[in-house]
Amino acid sequence: MKTKKRIGSVLKGLATAVLLLAALFPIYWMATIAVRENGEMSGTQMIPLLPQSFTLEHFKRLFVEKNFVQALQNSAVVTLLSMGISLAFGIACAYVLARRRFRFRGKTGLTYWVLLVRVLPPITFAVPLYVMFSRMGWLNSLAPEICACIFVNIPLTIWFLVSFFQELPLELEESAKIDGATEWQLFLRIVVPLVLPGIAAVAMLSFVYAWNEYTYSVIFVQSPGNYTVPLSLAILNTEDNIMQYGLVAAGSIISIIPMALFVIFAQKYLIAGLSSGAVKG
């Protein structure tokens, strides 16, 4: 029995190591390409696994020549605004849909409509949104990109958080009402803190989607001054820069950093919320 357990432990360790290697190797390879000189990556020979040279020229060119700072600023504006608005509306709507005491005509149909909007591919709404934004004169700004991300993230937030609100015991809310709490006090001081792990999780998903959004940006954005990070990285691979792998790799490494920092930040609230719930339970 001990031998079988040891063999099982070894196999699990090997499988974990293989999966970890498969997940981290693309990031390692991208980082090494970002610091290699162009001469090392040109020609028909295989690129060595370990860098034979070191340079920060790709990062310098990215910020000096390609105006990557503007793309980072645009992505930050789009991501933070769309995520904030999506969470504000999505949390409130999810709470209303999860509680039976909020009754209005079409509530069930609205719930299924939210699911339908979520499962349809984003490209489905590209044409009507483009026509609407064009007639509103918004195509030369970040507004279409922000609205498109909100349009996608609100259904995600609602559908994700409805189950969290439904799992909360009604006795907590009834006790708060007996103590004289208003609906807003009940919602903000009691309900929201209890679903903080769910909010942190959906905030991660919303942030990652908005930061990486490419489909709507390539359709709606018309001015180079409004390019986001994914769009800026895409245009680096033009006919003139087809061999500039270092620029693309450097931009990709930089674009990963904000997402990693936000996930680490949100993960603290996710773990804290789960731990708090476990202690209270």
Image (cartoon, grey):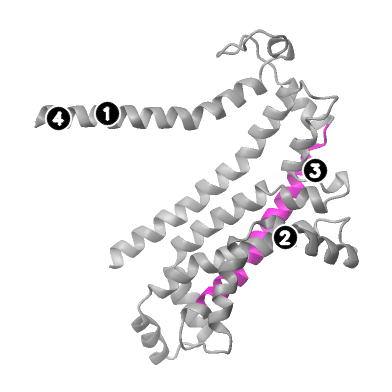
Quarter of the N terminus within the rendering: top left
Q: Which residue is mark 3?
A: 70
Kind of residue sitting beneath label 2? Ala
Alpha-carbon distance for marks 2 and 3?
20 Å
Kind of residue sitting beneath label 4? Lys
User: Circle 4 sits in a helix, a strand or a loop, which is it?
Assistant: helix
Q: Which residue is mark 1?
A: 11
Query: Which of disc 1 and disc 4 is earlier in sequence?
Result: 4
The residue range painted magenta reads 66-95
User: Magenta stretch: residue 75 in it?
Assistant: yes
Kind of residue sitting beneath label 1? Leu
Q: Quadrant of residue 5?
A: top left
Alpha-carbon distance for marks 1 and 3?
48 Å
Kind of residue sitting beneath label 3? Gln
The residue shown at (76%, 46%) is 228
Query: Which of disc 3 and disc 1 is earlier in sequence?
Result: 1
The residue shown at (62%, 12%) is 47
Query: Which of disc 4 and disc 3 is earlier in sequence?
Result: 4
Residue 197 location (% of width, % of height): 44, 61
The residue shown at (64%, 32%) is 253
Quarter of the C terminus within the rendering: bottom left
Q: Is residue 201 visible?
A: yes
Q: Which residue is mark 2?
A: 148
Query: Which of disc 3 and disc 2 is earlier in sequence?
Result: 3
Residue 50 location (% of width, % of height): 56, 13
Answer left or right for 199 relative to 30. left
Crowd band around label 2 with a 10 angstrom C-alpha radius: few (<14), some (14–19), many (20+): many
User: Circle 1 sits in a helix, a strand or a loop, which is it?
Assistant: helix
